[in-house]
Structures are given as structure tokens and as C-alpha cells.
Image (cartoon, rainbow, N blue to C red):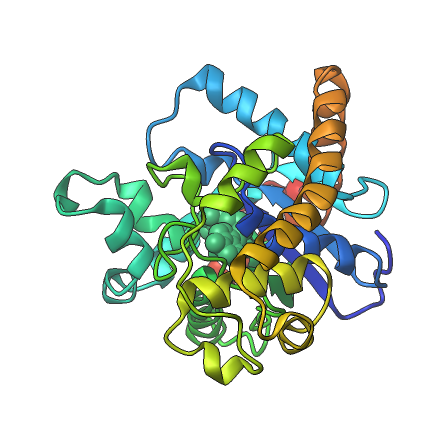
Amino acid sequence: MKNSSNEKRIFSGIQPTGNLTIGNYLGAVKRWVKLQAEKSDTIYCIVDLHAATTWQDPRELRETTRELVASLLACGLNPKESILFNQSQVSAHSELAWIFNCVARIGWLNRMTQFKDKAGKDKEKASVGLFAYPTLMAADILAYKATHVPVGEDQKQHLELTRDIASKFNLDYKVGDFFPLPEPLIEGAATRVMSLRDGQKKMSKSDASDFSRINLNDSSDLINQKIKKAKTDPYPLPDSLDELQGRPEALNLINIYAALSDRAPETVLEEFSGREFSYFKPKLAELTVDQICPISDKMKALLKDPNYIDCILHEGSTTAAQIANPIIHEVYEIVGLIRKRSQL
Ligand code: TYM
């Protein structure tokens, strides 16, 4: 571990379902890479068990998991500085999730908007796993007693639930602050990147239209086309963010530009105020291609060696288990479950 005496421990997760979008990149992964450079421990998890809450083709799941590792490495995650692994290789996640299923209340889970969105109209037909998804997410974080969780805005409600579960466990078993109450890190200009076709809808891997998103493996031609076709409005760019109220598509493109260039949206507006989209869009496309295309080139090169990727996941899982297992053993002690001597 980087610095075990440091009290800050960063944890985050990502699902291996389909290509990463620029929303995942700007809302999460780009910030994971920045946090890796700081002193705290950084633990990043590919949440394959979460992916299994909706049916996945087994062969594709293995492929998308490896592709995701390759993308994360290509984005700058360094397995020597961060722990990178897949959830299913560390049994602590599932074990703690069961305990949390017994701590969380059905009423709490009923309020989760992501379940409502994903289950759609016929909730009765959704898997039990999809309903219990947030308790596994709480287990991911708390199996490491993580204190900070960098995510996009869509995960905020799940993090509030994680804090509720941690508090209730601490209280029910009278164990003070055994579990920390993890802080969400939802920061920067791109905490909610919106669809390029509809500024009111989140950019998502699962949107039916590929033109609604930029994937990290899109070619430069496709990125140019997607940005050219992105929905906008007929007005020039204004001087201030206030004037972008009611113009969600324009605001979204400014935020993407700001996050890609590590600048504040206000500064981007200063540069482009009074300009038409016909001027701004090619600049945005150029910046996007410059940042995204090198990632997809690296990713393709890494995918040529699946053994290397599997080794990273194996080593990451071993290190992750060394942190999580003693915490799970303590939890079992607290709850009153008998353990073999060798496991204590
Ligand atoms: P997932 O796989 O849907 O997304 C991974 C990360 O990308 C962020 N994100 C976005 N950020 C900005 N704009 C967008 N359009 C956008 N789309 C996605 C997400 O907020 C997330 O940070 N439940 C989680 C995975 C998870 C997890 C965890 C996260 C499982 N266990 C523990 C943190 C801690 C999810 O489905 O993310």
C-alpha cells in the first residue's frame, strides 16, 4: 500500500458493460488518475458482480472486463500505484453484502432511483440482485473502510445509502465508528455529462443512439461527426454561465470542453463568448480527438496481451483481499458468527 498511515482511502468502481464513454472518463476515471498521484491509497474495482445483475453473455462479460482494464490502463491508471482488480475475485465483497442486506431496510432500497430507471415498468421481473445492487456497492466501499469515493453525480444516492448502512451497522452493534461514513467526491465541470442528442438526459453506454455519446474507442472521424451533429440551439455562446440557463445542450458542450482542458467553464466561456457553434464545435472536436484517440490506440495495444491483463487483475485482487479480509473477519466477530481459529 502507498501509505497505510494515511487516514484517507479512496475507493471507486465501474461496470464492465460495453465501451467507456467520455461521461465515465470525465466524471470518474480522469479524476481517479489524478487522485492516484496523491498520497492516499487508491483502490479501483471492476464491478463484474454488479454487471451480472442484468443478464450478460458470459464470453462477452470476460471480454468487456479485459477491455475495461485495458481502457483504464490506457487512461493512466498505474497498477503499481493503485490497486486495480475485479470484484468477483475478492469474496469479501459478497460476504459483506449479505450482512448489509440484513442491515439495510427494504424501504431504503425502494427509494433508489437507479433501480426504478433500470427495472423499467415491470419491476416484478427485475432480478433480486438489481434491487439489492446498492448494498453490494456499500460492501465494495466499506470492505476497505474507504473514506472517499470519486464518482459522477448519478451515484450520489447510492453513496447516501452507503452512509446510512454504515451508521446503522455502527449503531445496531454499538461499535462506535467502526465503519467510516464515506464522503462522495463529486467534483469538476463534468459530474453529469449529458447526451449529445438531448441535453436533459445523461450520456449513457446503454442509450440506443450511438450518436448520443462519445466512446473512448471512437475513431477521430466518428468523434468529428458526432460533435458536428450534436444538438445545439441557434444562439451564439454567451458571456456567463447564468446565461446558459435553459440551454442544456450548450452548457453540456462547454462543460465537456472545460473538463477536457482542465479549465473552469467560466474561463472557457470567456474564450468563446459571442462565437457561433460553427466556430466552437470544430475546436471541441479537435480537443476531444487529441485527448481520446491516444487512449484508444494504447488500449488496442494492451489488448494484444490478455495474459498481462489477467495478471494485473490477479495481483490487484490478492492485495485487495489482504486489506478486506481482516475487516470482514472483524465484522463476523462483531455480528457473532463463529470463525475457524486459522481465519481469525
Ligand atoms: P458506472 O459503471 O455506471 O459508471 C462508472 C462511473 O462513471 C460515472 N458516470 C458518469 N459521470 C458523469 N457523466 C456521465 N454521463 C456518467 N456516466 C457514468 C459514474 O457516476 C461512475 O462514477 N454503481 C456504479 C459502480 C460501483 C461503484 C461502487 C462506484 C459499484 N460499486 C463503489 C463507486 C463505489 C456504476 O454503475 O457506475
Left or right of residue 165: residue 308:
right
Taking the spot 70% from the left edge, 35% from the top edge, the residue there is: 293
**Quarter of the image where one finds residue 316:** top right
**Observer able to see residue 335:** yes
Relative depth, front residue between 301 and 84: 301
Dividing the picture into quadrants, the one containing residue 57 is top left
Relative to 66, say whether 272 is above or below.
below
**What is the x, y in percent for residue 40?**
80, 63
Total numbered labels: 0
* Residue 154 x %, y %: 44, 61
Which residue sits at x=60%, y=68%?
189
Task: Return the residue nearer the eye: 222 or 114.
Answer: 222
Q: Residue at x 32, y 42 (%)?
A: 129
Depth check: give the residue in front, 64 or 140. 64
Q: Position of residue 211 (x, y in %)?
A: 43, 39
Please state the horizontal and vertical placement of residue 74, each as a whole percent of the image.
Answer: 74, 36
What residue do we see at 25% from left, 38% from top? 127
Residue 342 appears in the figure: no
Q: Quadrant of residue 35?
A: bottom right
76 left or right of 243 in image: right
Image position of 151 (left or right of 292): left
Considering depth in this image, is 33 or 280 the residue closer to the camera? 280
